[in-house]
Image (cartoon, rainbow, N blue to C red):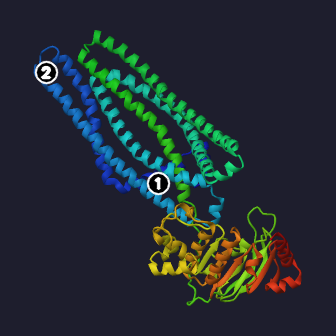
């Protein structure tokens, strides 16, 4: 969605109109419920001017004794009207709440589906605080206010219209005075709306910052404690919290000033009405009952006018939140231009051909004319200094990153021509940063499309990953809940759980991204044994930090500054005494 700020600054309405259209096109899905709610709201609104109309016969005929039946009929009428009003208000509020919650359900579903469909680059560039804010705050604001706007505008507009009709019926001269002052109130409202819109946009951005600061405080609590970062984090939070308070006070000031200023304009009209009414009472026979009914209707018109004024502020919050929500929904999904499938059975021959890549705003190429082949069943290790392009190269295989030029081929087919789902179904990944989900061990091992794996298949995968003995020792076995990101498991156990997940998938091509670099020696040995079982019969690309783990690789590709500088087996490269030998000696001294 193009910059709404520009549209706001220029005063044009196309962006706002588009947002209104998109919000209420979703609301229209529930039009039958909306229509019923509006009918009930209309009935409730109609009861209000009726109370004002009752004042004329009550004062003119009731207190004079001309109509004795008014003693019981008018009180009963008041009770009946209030009972009808209460039932209609309750029913309409319930129906609109039902619409709002169903609207929120659909909106969040669309947001989450688009979130999962974003490219890897979008996630790297994205602001996680803002993303979370869109789900937790912005979506709720849009849906709750969308139905509130309907309720308030329909109900209060009907009430104002009905009361104006009563006023005209009682005295058209006095009503003209009231109508003349209404545009003044509208002008005051428009002035404050622009300011509220700007404040609400700033508030949404700062709410995202607050979410990020709190999330980092939760995730990094150990680092904060060990490195005494209390002061820094407290200052960050205080800054964001203070900004939010200032924005809230600016909004509250504008919101609070809008109503009294509008009402002051109306109060002037009331004063003029009283003066003219007194003149008419003395010269043209305006009765006490008519004047009381007029003033009752005029008094009642203040509240709906006030609510109509205040809903303008709510509408601005809704539009800003909608802008944030639809920005996510409108983001381009991950490109999937492929239309072909891999020939079955997949052999697993992987070729990188003349790969060039440079990240945006980078001063040099990340990869420069990189070419090599991994034959079916081979293990190819990628080693080199940090920043040499190893991870970037491997991330091209599942199309997380696209090369600027060159090709990546599987069994001779360019992966750009293959459907994403088809391509990724033949790849498995075990990385240093293991991602596990809140659920049972069995659910994590058989994650995703492999969720229907049998109990025996899960146990076999755990056994091959050297984890079955540990799992059997747990109270609930494979049904044990692992918690958020399996925080109750050790690093080695989490790695072996990820290996079991890869074994269940049984993909012909395997990516190992520094899968043992963060483990102690004992855990590394256990994980390495599990990995060796996993690698059997699979084409494996290994990104290795610890060179001791790649000595058995069929070929080691040494990268430096985006170039391949050496290739060969472990012993061959040591004998060359090049970069690999230098890195190996350095690690050997460290060990």
Position of the N terminus, as image quadrant, is bottom right
Seen in the image, is 230 located left or right of residue 345? right
Q: Is residue 430 above or below residue 229?
A: below
Q: Residues within 10 Å of mark 2 (few under 14, many from 20)?
A: few
Where is residue 552 drawn, in percent x and y?
A: 73, 85
The residue under label 1 is 22
Secondary structure found at label 2 = helix
Where is residue 417 drawn, in percent x and y?
A: 61, 81
The residue under label 2 is 71
Q: How far separated are the C-alphas under marks 2 and 1?
A: 54 Å
Seen in the image, is 46 located left or right of residue 27? left
Residue drawn at point x = 42 percent, y = 30 percent? 306
Q: Is residue 447 above or below residue 207?
A: below
Residue drawn at point x = 82 percent, y = 69 percent? 590
Q: Is residue 304 visible?
A: yes
Of the pair 569 and 410, the residue shown nearer to us: 569
Of the pair 423 and 143, the residue shown nearer to us: 423
Position of the C terminus, as image quadrant, is bottom right
């Amino acid at each position: 969605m193009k910059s709404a700020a520009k549209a706001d600054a220029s005063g044009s309405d196309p962006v706002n109109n588009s947002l209104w259209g998109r919000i209420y096109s979703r609301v229209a899905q529930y039009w039958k419920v909306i229509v019923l709610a509006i009918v009930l709201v209309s009935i409730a609104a109609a009861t209000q001017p009726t109370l004002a109309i009752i004042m004329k016969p009550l004062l003119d005929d009731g207190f004079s004794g001309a109509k004795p039946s008014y003693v019981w009929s008018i009180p009963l009428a008041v009770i009946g009207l209030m009972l009808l009003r209460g039932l209609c208000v309750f029913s309409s509020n319930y129906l609109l709440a039902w619409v709002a919650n169903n609207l929120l359900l659909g909106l969040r579903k669309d947001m989450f589906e688009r979130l999962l469909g974003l490219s890897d680059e979008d996630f790297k560039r994205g602001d996680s605080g803002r993303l979370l804010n869109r789900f937790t705050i912005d979506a709720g604001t849009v849906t709750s206010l969308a139905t509130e706007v309907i309720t308030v505008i329909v109900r209060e507009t009907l009430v104002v219209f009905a009361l104006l009709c009563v006023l005209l019926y009682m005295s058209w001269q006095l009503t003209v005075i009231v109508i003349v002052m209404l545009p003044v109130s509208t002008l005051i409202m428009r002035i404050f709306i622009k300011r509220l819109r700007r404040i609400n946009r700033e508030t949404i951005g700062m709410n995202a910052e607050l979410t990020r600061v709190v999330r980092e405080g939760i995730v990094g609590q150990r680092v904060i404690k060990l490195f005494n970062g209390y002061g820094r984090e407290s200052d960050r939070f205080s800054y964001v919290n203070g900004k939010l308070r200032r924005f809230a006070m600016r909004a509250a000031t504008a919101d609070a000033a809008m109503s009294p200023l509008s009402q002051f304009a109306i109060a002037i009209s009331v004063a003029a009405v009283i003066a003219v009414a007194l003149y008419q009472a003395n010269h043209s026979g305006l009765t006490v009952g008519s004047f009381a009914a007029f003033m009752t209707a005029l008094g009642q018109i203040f509240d709906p006018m006030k609510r109509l004024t205040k809903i303008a502020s709510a509408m601005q919050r809704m539009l800003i939140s909608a802008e944030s929500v639809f920005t996510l929904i409108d983001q381009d999904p991950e490109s999937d231009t492929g239309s072909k499938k891999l020939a079955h059975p997949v052999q697993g021959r992987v070729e990188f051909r003349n790969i060039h890549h440079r990240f945006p705003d980078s001063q040099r190429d990340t990869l420069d004319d990189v070419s090599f082949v991994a034959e079916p069943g081979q293990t190819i290790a990628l080693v080199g200094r940090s920043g040499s392009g190893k991870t970037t190269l491997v991330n091209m295989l599942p199309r997380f990153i696209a090369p600027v030029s060159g090709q990546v081929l599987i069994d001779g087919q360019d992966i750009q021509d293959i459907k994403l789902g088809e391509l990724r179904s033949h790849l498995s990944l075990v990385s240093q940063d293991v991602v596990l989900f809140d659920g049972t061990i069995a659910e994590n091992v058989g994650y995703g499309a492999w969720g229907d794996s049998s109990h025996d298949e899960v146990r076999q995968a755990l056994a091959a990953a050297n984890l079955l003995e540990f799992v059997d020792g747990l109270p609930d076995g494979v049904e044990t809940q692992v918690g958020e990101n399996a925080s109750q498991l050790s690093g080695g156990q989490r790695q072996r759980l990820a290996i079991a997940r890869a074994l269940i998938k049984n993909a012909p091509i395997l990516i190992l991204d520094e899968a043992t670099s963060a483990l102690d020696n004992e855990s590394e040995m256990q994980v390495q044994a599990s990995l060796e079982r996993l690698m059997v019969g699979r084409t494996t690309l290994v990104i290795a930090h610890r060179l001791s783990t790649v000595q058995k690789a069929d070929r080691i590709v040494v990268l430096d500054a985006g170039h391949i500088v050496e290739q060969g087996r472990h012993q061959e490269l040591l004998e060359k005494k090049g970069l690999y030998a230098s890195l190996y000696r350095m690690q050997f001294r460290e060990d």
